[in-house]
Each structure stands twice: as C-alpha cells, then as structure tokens.
Image (cartoon, rainbow, N blue to C red):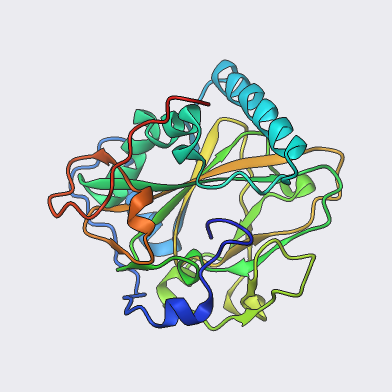
C-alpha cells in the first residue's frame, strides 16, 4: 500500500499481468543475516526484531519525524499522509538507502536491489482506526511478487499501542481473496481479507525504537486501533530486486541501492536537496 487516497483501483491492477507467487530467497552467502534467518523468512514470511539504530540515532530520527508530522498536519494532512517521502525529503531518502538496512535486504533479495517506497504509518494516541488484514501485493503494480517491506520502529511498538501483527506462513498461500472496504472509515486501507483467523494465529510484531522487522509482500498482516496514550509510529521502506517490473509509472519511484539495473527500468531519482 502506498498512499491512502491514491491507491491503484482493482480494475487497473487486474489488467496488469502479475506473477503473485512467493519466490523463496536463495542467498548462498548472506553477509548480515544468518542462513537460519533466511530459512525462517522463507518459511514464516518475516523476520523480527533486528537492531539497526542506537538510542541516540533513533532519537534524532524521531525528532525529525516530529517536525515533519507537525508541518504535515498544519498543511491539512493527517498522520498517514507522509507517503513516497523519499522523493521529497532528503533525510527519508537517506533512511531508505541506509547501508545497515540495505545489507539486510540484500541478503533476502540478492545483489541488485531497488528501493521504491517510503511511508510513515503513525497511529496517534487514541487513534480508533485499524489497518485491516491485507497483503501488500494486492496494492502494488509489481511483478513478479518479490518485494520486501522493512518496518522501522520510530517509537516503541507493542500490543498496547497497536503494533503490527503477522499471520505466519500466509505468504506461501498465493494471492488471497479480499473484499473492498472503501466505506469503512475505521480502516486506514481500502481492502480487507475476511476471516483471517482461519489462516493461523497472529503474531504481535513488538519492536523497540530503532529496530526493524522485514516481511514478504504476500504475508497477511494488519494492526488494531490504538486506544493507549502512546503514539506508535513506524516508517515502512519498500524494496525489490532490479528484475521486478513496475506498471502504472511506479518505476519512477525506484532508487538503485545495490548493484545495478541493467535494463534501465527504474528511474533512479537523485536525493532531494530540500527537506
């Protein structure tokens, strides 16, 4: 999912030929992750938690986001509005291309990696909206289905303040049937996979600020409303191998963060000078 209110409609995506099968990671010599972690990702569809930033580093990132959020709210947006942020904000571009994060992604996707998405998902204290069960691949005009999402915890995230939840192994089920939920104001997104409990027991993705999780674009996931007095903000960073093709002009978002794009499919925009 890229941006509430600017999501390709189902008919647009249905017209695109897409390979929506899980393609297991096959990195023979991982550098940052372990072979056991790669095997776990192939089996369960996710990894968590992986420490990336120190307390001092994430405090600086949080202060940056606080300012960005304040400016977004003042301009009439909401806490979910900061999407495709790497094309407008240099510091978000720096996070998307950060070597420590890219090192983890390379171990799952291979040497040639494209970073194409960046979206803050910020649940304010008392936020009554949920993110219904969904697969990211349902929203994205990408093929084949090899994308990985990094979820960077800006704040501590746990069950109390509505951390993300996964249903392990659902990435191996292929593309699941969903229903549109565009009229459900309590749902941040516009799709819901109904009766998700039939696929397994959900796992809470509890993360400390500065840690990341990684999940497959086919993994069923979501989050509840946040009734607590604590904010829960995460920055989603999206990656795929360079051989993935993007329709509907989405290749304009893609930055080469490792290796090369020999076909020249991805636009590889430069870092924004302003922030």
241, 206: nearer the viewer: 241
Quadrant hosting residue 58 = top right
- The location of residue 62, given as percent across then percent down, is 64, 26
Q: Nearer the viewer, residue 167 or 147?
A: 147
On the question of residue 175 being in view, the answer is no
The quadrant in which residue 222 appears is bottom right
Question: Could one spot residue 32 in this view of the protein?
Answer: yes
Q: Report whether 14 appears left or right of 257.
A: right
Rendered location of residue 236, percent (x, y):
53, 46
- At horizontal 12% and vertical 50% (from top left) the residue drawn is 262
Q: Is residue 182 above or below residue 101?
A: below
Examine the rendered structure and indicate whether residue 83 appears above or below residue 133: above
What residue is rendered at 63% in x and 69% in y?
133
Q: Which residue is rendered at x = 69% and y = 76% of the image?
A: 181
Q: Quadrant of residue 82?
A: top right
Above or below residue 43? Residue 172 is: below
What percent of the width, then of the height, locates residue 271? 37, 31
At a point 46% along the width and 28% down the height, the residue shown is 90
Q: Position of residue 108 (x, y in %)?
A: 31, 50
């Amino acid at each position: 999912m890229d941006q509430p209110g600017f999501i390709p409609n189902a008919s647009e995506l249905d017209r695109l030929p897409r390979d929506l099968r899980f393609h297991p990671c096959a990195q023979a010599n991982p550098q940052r992750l372990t072979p056991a972690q790669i095997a776990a990702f192939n089996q369960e569809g996710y990894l968590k938690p992986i420490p990336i930033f120190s307390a001092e580093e994430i405090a600086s990132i949080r202060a940056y986001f606080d300012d960005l959020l304040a400016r977004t709210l003042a301009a009439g947006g909401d806490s979910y509005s900061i999407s495709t942020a790497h094309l407008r904000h240099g510091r978000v571009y720096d996070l998307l291309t950060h070597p420590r994060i890219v090192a983890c992604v390379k171990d799952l996707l291979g040497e040639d990696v494209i970073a194409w998405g960046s979206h803050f998902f910020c649940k304010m204290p008392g936020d009554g909206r949920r993110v219904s069960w969904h697969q990211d691949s349902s929203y994205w005009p990408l093929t084949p289905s090899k994308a990985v999402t990094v979820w960077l915890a800006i704040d501590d995230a746990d069950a109390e303040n509505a951390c993300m939840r996964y249903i392990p192994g659902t990435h191996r089920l292929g593309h699941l049937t969903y229903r549109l939920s565009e009229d459900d104001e309590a749902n941040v997104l516009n799709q819901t996979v109904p009766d998700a409990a039939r696929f397994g027991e959900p796992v809470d993705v509890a993360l400390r600020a500065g840690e990341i999780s990684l999940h497959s674009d086919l993994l069923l996931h979501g989050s509840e409303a946040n009734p607590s007095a604590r904010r829960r903000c995460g920055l989603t960073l999206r990656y795929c191998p360079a051989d993935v093709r993007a329709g509907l002009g989405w290749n304009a978002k893609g930055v080469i963060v490792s290796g090369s794009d020999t076909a020249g499919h991805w636009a590889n925009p430069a870092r924004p000078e302003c922030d």
